[in-house]
Image (cartoon, helix red, strand yellow):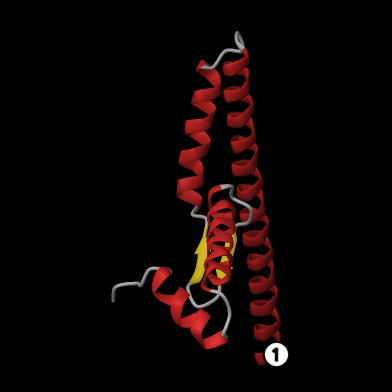
Amino acid sequence: MLPKSSKHYIQPTADLLNIDQQLVEDLVSFYYSRLRKALSELEAPQIRVENMGTFKAKNKKLKELYVRYSKHLEVTSSDTIKQMRVKKRTEQKLERVMHIQNLINEERKRRNKFLKEKHESSTKTKS
């Protein structure tokens, strides 16, 4: 299955809704730019996109990002303004990765606790 580009939907949607094609194109551009930003900036561990599915942050990839950003911070100095900006951006990225990892770990703990309680209650009712 080959996905269609958004431009295949712009003209038919504009015709169907009887509105300007530029308005539909601006809306689609805004939506996809917001989606790209949410994915690239790790806004949440899971991002649900209607009719496309759920995008989940992978724990293994987060660990790799954590190592990469940590190494980058080790070698980055704060001698110039440009280096300070790079270091600050890298620190922000590292904080986002750590935040998402914490959210994933909390969700995993919550799920395990729920399943454990569910399993214990089901074994008690069978006895």
Residue 80 in the image: state x and y as whole percent: 60, 10
Q: In which quarter of the image is the C terminus?
A: bottom right
Q: Which residue lies furthest to the top in this view?
A: 79
Foreground: 114 or 12?
12
Callout 1: 10 Å neighbours few (<14), some, many (20+)? Answer: few
Q: In which quarter of the image is the N terminus?
A: bottom left
Residue 35 in the image: state x and y as whole percent: 56, 59
Residue plotted at (51% across, 51% down): 59
Residue plotted at (62% across, 61% down): 108
Q: Taking 12 as reference, is 114 above or below it?
A: above
Q: What element carries label 1?
A: helix
- Identify which amino acid the numbered label 1 is placed on: Thr
| Number of marks in picture | 1
Foreground: 41 or 36?
36
Residue plotted at (55% across, 23% down): 73
Answer with the quarter of the image where residue 116 lies: bottom right
Residue 52 in the image: state x and y as whole percent: 47, 73
Q: Residue furthest left?
A: 1
Residue 38 in the image: state x and y as whole percent: 59, 54
Which residue is under mark 1? 125
Q: Residue furthest bottom?
A: 126
Foreground: 65 or 59?
65
Q: Say left or right for 36 vs 112.
A: left
Residue plotted at (69% across, 64% down): 110
